[in-house]
């Protein structure tokens, strides 16, 4: 049962607010296993909606699901030099199986490039077999020191796409296609605007040629990397000898891509839309888009309003809406409202004896506003309401992001001050030197989130590096990040 | 690409047939990790269809999905005495994380009773919180010595339901409800008839009060346990202190159930319906229910038949059918037919210039039969064809099972002979003595698959034990099993 005392406000302590919201909305819980979370039904239902929408997008673009082993022989990780350096320190290692010490320890997958490309090597023979476009929904494990529910946990759920192509151009096109799908999903479903762009070499995936990411700005002005898409070049193809015969009979290495999003997106959803009352869930991802609360004082009223609520539920469900009726007895309507608000249900319909008489319901929006609306034509109305709320949430989040973005700080000091007070995204010129990037991180705790794609860049390209004053080679976007 | 040589026949070597069929249909493959399989897209698509159908059934009966950690502290397993005895010998154990030796080793879940009930203990306070009806879709690991694709692998995918109830009666009702859902799914979707019944104490789940199972008979007359549903009593509730406050203010232990089906069902599907040409997939579970093959000799014919095929595909898809068009060039129609047959696609439509002229398609069924049918009204026709093929597959499997079932053998020798020649299911009287059960297993390699539910029992209950001649306490069903 949800507790009834108010949660800490965002202004008081954002981090405490986040944790208390998750407990109050019963989205997740800490488990007895260090760093591993339990995703409770209310949280898992959001993940299921996310999965369905993404899975449809992947399939519409020709990808197929498969499943590869949880365990990876330790030697596989070492076959790609940067990859092992990046992932070996954070692996969980199985040393015993069936009561015996294993000849070779098995790593619990932190990501599956190595095991998947070892299979691609077996399956791919000819140019006719390409492209291979695969995806898997799976759990992965990375031994994290400091964990936070949804954002960074030892085990998490994700999808990882893995593809093989005939050329670098085709692999790059795939990498960018997926980046665009991710962006569309985050904007149209999570109502979370993102900046897309290229990662610097210091921030890219261990083993990739190039990494692109989606970066969102949370309400505490910290950045959240919400998804990444990697052009792996031929690095893994060479390590695992994934070759194909060309039409001319030559042997060539394939070009790979990999890409993933995870349950971390639920953390992004919470920190983009949540308020001091609890979760605000975008209707397209909500387990229940509408909760109907019948209101009564007598047994007679109870039977009548409950019957009407169930009838209304049936009508709305038939129109494709996700609707539930809160029939619980011994609980006041106000207590029910409070609970459903904490859980983020987008729309509430109150249905009392007076509404039965008038043919209306009282429609309350989680984002504010309450008014009587006719039951006649309610399903069409609700579809429009859902679309409108999605748009409003996205626009509000965009406006907040823009209000917390600094473009072209006039001085290094202004850049530092902005980051010091957790100001949000800052766009500025960068000389491209990794040592400078590292120094900025060291001194400001901010990282280059990405080198933004053209549409996000400032109208006038910066000419000097904000840190060194040397000529800028690119425009970069910095922030302190999760 | 599928190889073109014929597979071993079932009569020649059933086991080789099974393995070759899986490779030919590209359902799964062996991985470099001992005992772990890769589920390839053609196999995973069947699993996705299974998941969707089962998930709907679970949700319609009030169950919610959640997700619990992959890792279980080793000490948790030991809290329930029978449970640890059953599972500890086959666990994979993580001893190192993040480069350090762990204080307490973590077991990779072989099943999740212990970790889940430790969370239930935290969440359940009052009788108002009951029942708790949860399910998770997850991977599990059991260190198997001899593995076979889908049937017995070190890692496999499954769902595990876990519930908590106020009384033994309610828990028993839940256990039986799920058993009936499993049976319905296996019959209506996999078209695989099953015998349901109670497991003996020697065969029940480690830690359960009672285990019920679904037992199917494969084409080689071996039994496959395809799903189990356990009434756990208060065993785990006591081990993990899962208590609730009654309406009267008393503390009581809850009553638990758990139940699961896995990717093993795909093995059951293959061995129930497959033939010497390859897979036969029941249409309700097929990734593609219909493949349309356009046939041409000239470029002009190619363009015309391809356009007609795509139009037909659109019509059939709009009617909710899963349809694909095989547009590949440089491959003869016959080679395509061969490949799609091996993959088990239920219906093939051949569409050539003559069909365009006549307004027909040539409809071929994977189960035999081929005839021209009008394109007019084809969607309705295909829905009827699908229903008819589902029924025919189930009836054929039932008839085969009945033909390979012996009821009431007249002597111990007849019982032994029947099992010796892998005769199938044998129903006979049993005295109930575990030592006798063990002796029969030792001498015949057959186990009691279950004590069949009333509707499966013989019209006249056996009066004597087939092995000892003592009075029978129950009717049991034996078979050699996977």
Image (cartoon, coloured by chain):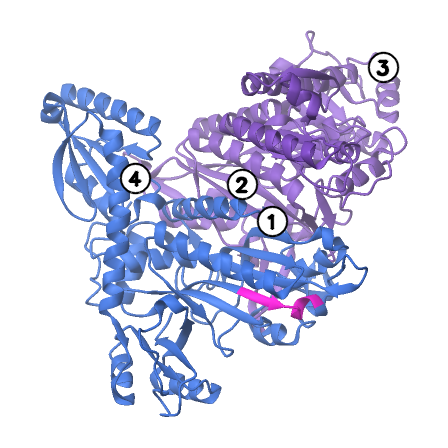
Chain colours: A blue, B purple
Spatial separation of the CA atoms under disc 1 and disc 3: 43 Å
Spatial separation of the CA atoms under disc 1 and disc 4: 33 Å
Q: Nearer the viewer, residue B186 or A207?
A: A207
Residue extending farthest to the top is: B460
Q: Are marks 1 and 2 in contact (CB under 8 Å)?
A: yes
Residue B86 counted in the magenta span: no
Give the side of residue B39 with respect to residue B468, left or right.
left
* Element marked by disc 1: strand
Q: Quadrant of residue B452?
A: top right
Q: Are marks 2 and 4 in contact (CB under 8 Å)?
A: no
The residue indicated by pointer 3 is B411
Residue at 62%, 48% in the rendered image: A66
The residue stretch that appears in magenta: A230-237
The residue indicated by pointer 4 is A289
The residue indicated by pointer 2 is B160
The residue indicated by pointer 1 is B140
Q: For mark 3, name the chain.
A: B
Spatial separation of the CA atoms under disc 2 and disc 4: 27 Å
Q: Nearer the viewer, residue A424 or B235?
A: A424
N-terminal label among 1 and 3: 1
């Amino acid at each position: 049962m949800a507790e009834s005392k108010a949660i800490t406000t965002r202004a008081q302590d954002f981090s405490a607010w986040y944790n208390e919201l998750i407990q109050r909305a019963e989205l997740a819980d800490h488990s007895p296993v260090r760093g591993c979370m339990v995703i409770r039904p209310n949280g898992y239902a959001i993940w299921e909606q996310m999965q369905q929408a993404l899975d449809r997008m992947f399939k519409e673009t020709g990808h197929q699901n498969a499943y590869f082993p949880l365990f990876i022989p330790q030697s596989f990780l070492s076959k790609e030099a940067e990859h092992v350096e990046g992932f070996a320190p954070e692996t969980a290692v199985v040393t015993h199986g069936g009561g015996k010490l294993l000849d070779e320890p098995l790593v619990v997958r932190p990501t599956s490039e190595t095991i998947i490309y070892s299979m691609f090597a077996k399956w791919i023979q000819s140019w006719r077999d390409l492209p291979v476009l695969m995806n898997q929904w799976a759990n992965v494990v990375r031994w994290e020191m400091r964990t936070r529910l949804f954002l960074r946990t030892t085990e998490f759920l994700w999808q990882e796409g893995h593809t093989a192509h005939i050329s670098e151009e085709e692999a790059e096109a795939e990498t960018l296609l997926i980046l665009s799908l991710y962006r569309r999903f985050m904007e149209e479903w999570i109502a979370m605007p993102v900046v897309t762009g290229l990662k610097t070499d210091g921030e890219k995936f261990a083993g990739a040629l190039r990494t692109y990411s989606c970066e969102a700005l949370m309400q505490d002005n910290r950045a959240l990397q919400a998804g990444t898409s990697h052009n792996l070049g031929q690095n893994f193809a060479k390590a695992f000898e994934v070759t194909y015969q060309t039409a001319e009979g030559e042997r060539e290495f394939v070009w790979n891509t990999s890409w993933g999003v995870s349950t971390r997106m639920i953390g992004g959803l919470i920190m983009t839309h949540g308020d001091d009352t609890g979760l605000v869930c975008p209707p397209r991802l909500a387990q229940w888009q509408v909760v109907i609360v019948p209101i009564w004082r007598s047994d007679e009223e109870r039977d009548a309003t409950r019957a009407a609520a169930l009838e209304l539920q049936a009508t709305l469900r038939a129109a494709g809406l996700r609707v539930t009726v809160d029939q619980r007895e011994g609980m006041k309507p106000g207590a029910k409202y409070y609970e459903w608000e904490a859980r983020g249900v987008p729309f509430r319909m109150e249905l009392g004896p007076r509404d039965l008489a008038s043919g209306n319901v009282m429609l309350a929006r989680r984002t504010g506003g309450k008014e009587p609306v006719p039951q006649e034509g309610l399903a069409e109305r609700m579809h429009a309401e859902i679309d409108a709320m999605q748009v409003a949430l996205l626009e509000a989040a965009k406006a907040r992001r823009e209000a917390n973005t600094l473009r072209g700080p006039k001085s290094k000091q202004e850049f530092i001050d902005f980051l010091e007070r957790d100001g949000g995204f800052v766009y500025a010129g960068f000389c491209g030197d990794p040592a400078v990037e590292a120094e900025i991180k060291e001194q400001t705790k901010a990282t280059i989130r990405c080198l933004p794609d053209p549409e996000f860049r400032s109208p006038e390209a910066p000419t000097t590096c904000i840190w060194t004053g040397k000529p800028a080679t690119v425009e970069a976007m910095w922030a302190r990040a999760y």
